[in-house]
Amino acid sequence: MTRIYHNKLVNAKAMIQEAYKNKYAIGHFNINNLEWTKSILEAAQASKTPVILGTSEGAIKYMGGVKVVVGMVNGLLDSLNITVPVALHLDHGQSVEVAKECILAGYSSIMFDGSHLPYEENLAKTKEVVAFAAQHEVSVEAEIGSVGGEEDGVVGAGELGDPKEAAEFADLGIDMLAAGIGNIHGKYPEWWKSLSFETLEVLQNAAKMPMVLHGGSGIPKEQVMKAISLGISKINVNTELQLAFRDATRAYVEAKKDLDDVKKGFDPRKLLAPGTQALKDTFLELTSWFGCQGKAN
């Protein structure tokens, strides 16, 4: 099988290791379409921020498949003259086959999420993905326990990670480890109080490697900062961008600007402009929390 290589995309290993060493976190932002991707890349370039663009399996299907996603991202990197490090990452890949498909299409980073499988099967399949990814210089993220909530059909009960499992996964040669520490995909319910920092400390002591915080949308700033200090080096954001886009677009429509036929307020470029600006603003706010702004080499 031949892989199509693209020079501008980088795998996430170097940026994640630098973040882990210097106690900040790289932002992983899920993309959903052209506007989403363009907004994040422009904001990253303007703020000199390394970034990971993530796609769930559902988003890949929505955008037309892996070849469309890879072509769109690489086309934007070229046309926008993006010079900051950018990784294209499969988020919550549910099978070895999907992980390999993305690698061969040109993804530079992969998450194999076998947390829904029996532990030994998760371990064995993660090992298989690591071996395949290494042939193509692609970084690998794995998951133990599970992140609570639902995202694009991936449902987790929210089990806390186990330190013995964390140590065993670290030995597989993965580049980053996701584990349940009380985090939840989607909007956090009112009863939710805090991440389990005790669990994070135990897992970090066992794995001694960069860890990933999924469900990063809506966690209070002080908790984000503490998690980073304890070894979180990658933070995944999706819902927060979606909500920002929704609110800005709703305000435009409620102001009836889309009904202004003289100014052509119905033009998609005008209709989507407030939402895309909100994406940029949210990106800049969150990456300032994460400490990764200005860290592009």
Image: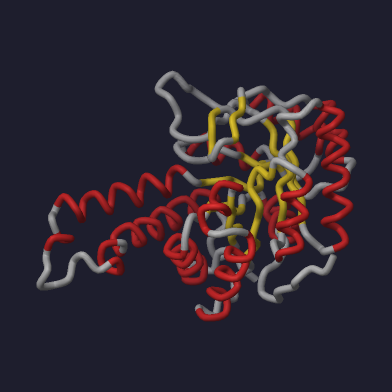
**Front-most of 61 and 181?**
61
Count of number-bearing discs: 0
- Which image quadrant for residue 256? bottom left
Residue 36 lies, in percent from the top left, at: 45, 60
Q: Is residue 202 above or below residue 85?
A: above
Name the residue: 13% across, 60% down. Answer: 259
Residue in the image at 34% along x and 61% along y: 277
Which quadrant would the N terminus be assigned to in this image?
Answer: bottom right
User: For this view, does 154 lie left or right of residue 145?
Assistant: left
Indicate the colouring scheme.
secondary structure
| Residue 230 position by quadrant | top right
Residue 228 relative to residue 136: left or right = left
Q: Position of residue 186 (x, y in %)?
A: 48, 35
* Residue 196: percent from left, percent from top: 61, 25
**Can residue 150 be spotted in the picture?**
yes
Check the image and name the residue furthest to the top: 191
Residue in the image at 56% along x and 46% along y: 58
Q: Would residue 65 appear left or right of 94 to someone viewing this image?
A: left
- Residue 266: % across, % down: 21, 65
Task: Kindly tell me whether residue 27 is visible in this rendering.
Answer: no
Q: Is residue 172 depicted above or below 280 in this figure?
A: above
Q: Nearer the viewer, residue 173 or 289?
A: 173
- The answer to which quarter of the image holds residue 119 is top right
- What residue is drawn where x is 30% and y is 69%? 269
Quadrant placement of the C terminus: bottom right
